[in-house]
Image (cartoon, rainbow, N blue to C red):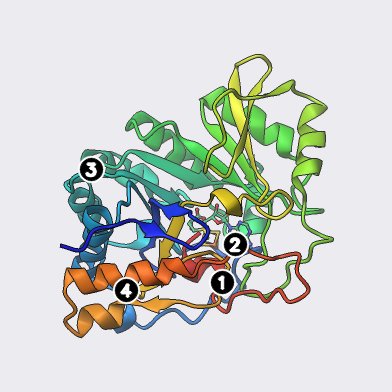
Amino acid sequence: MSTGPLLDTFGRVATDLRVSLTDRCNLRCSYCMPAEGLDWLPGEEVLTDDEVVRLITVAVERLGVREVRFTGGEPLLRRGLPDIVRRTTALRPRPQTSITTNGLGLSRTAATLAEAGLDRVNVSLDTVRREDFATITRRDRLPDVVAGLAAASAAGLGPVKVNAVLMRGVNDDQAPELLRWCLARGYQLRFIEQMPLDAQHQWSRESMITAEEIFASLNAEFLLEPAEEPRGSAPAELFTVDGGVGTVGVIASVTRPFCGDCDRVRLTADGQVRNCLFARQESDLRAALRDGADDNEIADRWRVAMFGKRAGHGIDDLSFLQPVRPMSAIGG
Ligand code: SAM
Ligand code: SF4
């Protein structure tokens, strides 16, 4: 049996697999997708549940993957999600499992997912003001997300994390309000700098809200102190709030990149391995699978795909080119 880690030329080892289960979504966050949506992947190109589980099995049993996060698009739109989670948590060594979701429908599925073995959820929520939510996501669904968060917490899918993106002139004055809201409910809030991964290619360095600005706005109302746990490969810089009433994280992917410690690898819904969010190349595991490759061959291809991972995302380089796939089609 071919075993051995997902190593690259810089000595990094990928142990955290992000699996996109669909490129479709029921929201239209303006920093992610255009109002009309995108040209979704044709059904036959999307991996079946069995194909997804087979690739995860190879990753866990042969490539040393220890954590599997399901994402998209919106992973809760994938009907087979509970079954995929159940089969993933039955693997040995048992990987940690989580989903990144917009929370729509989570109030109905949280208990089922917990029962299937899901460990944690990250719910994306950029504002707790209903009108602003409708503006940002182009759907008036804030109450559903709030209910989804509560259900996840009640189902034991914790610590429940909330991911927020701030946009200039839209919600950039709401960092303290979001933090108060999350602290009151026991959710761990993390702000994410906006990245050049929107389908519309409208991102600009000048208009993005930087980690520096987020800190300035939070420091005006809270006492933030670096949390003791080392950052390691976790992208969020973590802070305790007001002496320990909670924590808040900032993921400064653009202004303080953490590429040197990256331990991630991504699998798209159509079975392409990406060694980085910003990779310009992909490796087609779906074709290998459907051509009858055995697990050894798939593992070998996957290792080759990782080996060439670049040192960093290079957003600041003059030669930087945004990847062809947007975030929603890669798996955020
Ligand atoms: N639909 C799910 C959700 O929203 O959580 C999962 C997929 S979404 C692409 C994953 C995360 O990426 C979300 O937290 C979202 O806010 C974030 N995201 C999307 N576009 C982004 C961008 N251009 N820059 C930074 N984060 C982005
Ligand atoms: Fe959908 Fe998530 Fe993109 Fe929003 S960020 S449009 S919820 S995929």
Q: Mark 2 points at which residue?
A: 311
Q: In this view, does 220 lie above or below 231?
A: above
Which label's residue is closer to the chain start, 2 or 1?
Answer: 2
Which label's residue is closer to the chain start, 4 or 2?
Answer: 4
Q: Name the residue under label 4.
A: 301
Q: Name the residue under label 3.
A: 94
Q: In which quarter of the image is residue 251?
A: top right
Callout 4–callout 3 Cβ contact below 8 Å: no
- Label 2 – label 3 distance at C-alpha: 30 Å
Q: Which residue is drawn at 70% across and 55% down?
A: 254
User: For numbered disc 1, what is the local secondary structure?
Assistant: loop
| Label 3 C-beta lies within 8 Å of the nearest ligand 1 atom | no
In this orientation, which residue lies closer to the viewer: 139 or 12?
12
Q: Mark 1 points at which residue?
A: 326
Q: Residues within 10 Å of mark 4 (few under 14, many from 20)?
A: some
User: For numbered disc 3, what is the local secondary structure?
Assistant: loop
